[in-house]
Amino acid sequence: MPLAEAQTTAVLMLALGQLAYLFNCRFLNRSSLTPDVLRGNPVIWWSSALLVAFQVFFTYTPFMHDWFATASVGLREWGLTIAFAVLIFLLVEAGKAWERRRARASLAVPTTARLRRVCRVTITVRRSRPDDHEAILALMDRARGVGLSDEERARRGFVQGRMTAELLDRFQDGPGVFVADAAGELAGFAITSEAGGLPPEHPASAAVTAVVEAARGRDLGRMFLYGPVAVDDRFQGRGVLTRLITALSRALRDDFDLGSRSSRRPTNAPSRSTATTG
């Protein structure tokens, strides 16, 4: 291969490798091998398009060849660099998977020192921020109880369904998502939504119907739902769920009259309950 083409191919490899790593970094604490990596952030598509456009401009514009001693390349060079970019993406994902596995193993049998540190941490409840979303989605995945037996799921509890970054953004635009913050670590979360906008087939509609029927015709006012709710295993037994529900009830009491859990199924929280917010 002539030197000019080799130099162009090297620059192309750097550009496409960076593009692959951009998608790796879309989710730092979970796998990017998911359709969610393509949703929720339109900026990534603008960035990718600009990078490819500038690279094509660099590769095929004659005056760029004169400035940088490069040359046009063919489909073979594009195919090789794309293949290497995909390889980079897969290697980084393998590294992330190994780190997640190591982290889970380190939490499986907590050391005495780690337990003492967790117990000393002050837990505060606040509304979530965009930078909390990765940790919320990761905890949601762990709380689904995948791989547990039915007996273990019944004993420990589990969260139903899947959550995406786009759906989490929609919940944050509603009554809000509340997180229990333990010195920068996510101890738990509670997602809230307004009851009035649910279609009849929505699973949470059963909870709303049960509350309305129990009221026997009384006006309940505006109702919000809380759930899914999850607490990190390391922080269970420290009243995190109680703090979450107390804080969100106080935060929403000026806009709502009643709160209800959105699911009847077991989770790693207590059974469905209602609470007035006044």
Image (tube, helix red, strand yellow):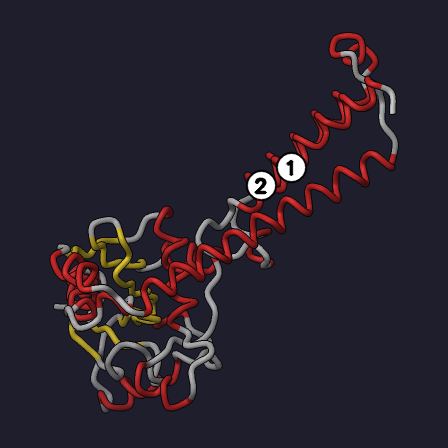
Disc 1 vs disc 2: Cβ atoms closer than 8 Å?
yes
**Residue nearest the viewer, comparing 57 with 6:** 6
Residue 253, numbered label: none
Residue 92 x, y percent position in the rendering? 56, 48
Residue 67 x, y percent position in the rendering? 75, 8
**Residue nearest the viewer, comparing 107 with 143:** 107
Q: How many marks?
A: 2
Q: Residues within 10 Å of mark 2 (few under 14, many from 20)?
A: some
Q: Quadrant of residue 74?
A: top right
Residue at 81% from the left image edge and 40% from the top image edge: 79
Q: Is residue 53 above or below residue 276?
A: above
Residue at 75% from the left image edge and 37% from the top image edge: 81
Residue 21, numbered label: 2
Q: Residues within 10 Å of mark 1 (few under 14, many from 20)?
A: many
Asked if residue 133 shows in the view, the reply is: yes
In the picture, measured across the screen, residue 153 lies left or right of residue 218, that is right
Residue 103 x, y percent position in the rendering? 38, 59
Q: Quadrant of residue 109?
A: bottom left
**Residue nearest the viewer, comparing 29 with 244:** 29
Which element is circle 1 on? helix
Quadrant for the N terminus, please: top right
Residue 17, numbered label: 1
The amino acid sitting under disc 2 is Tyr
The amino acid sitting under disc 1 is Gly
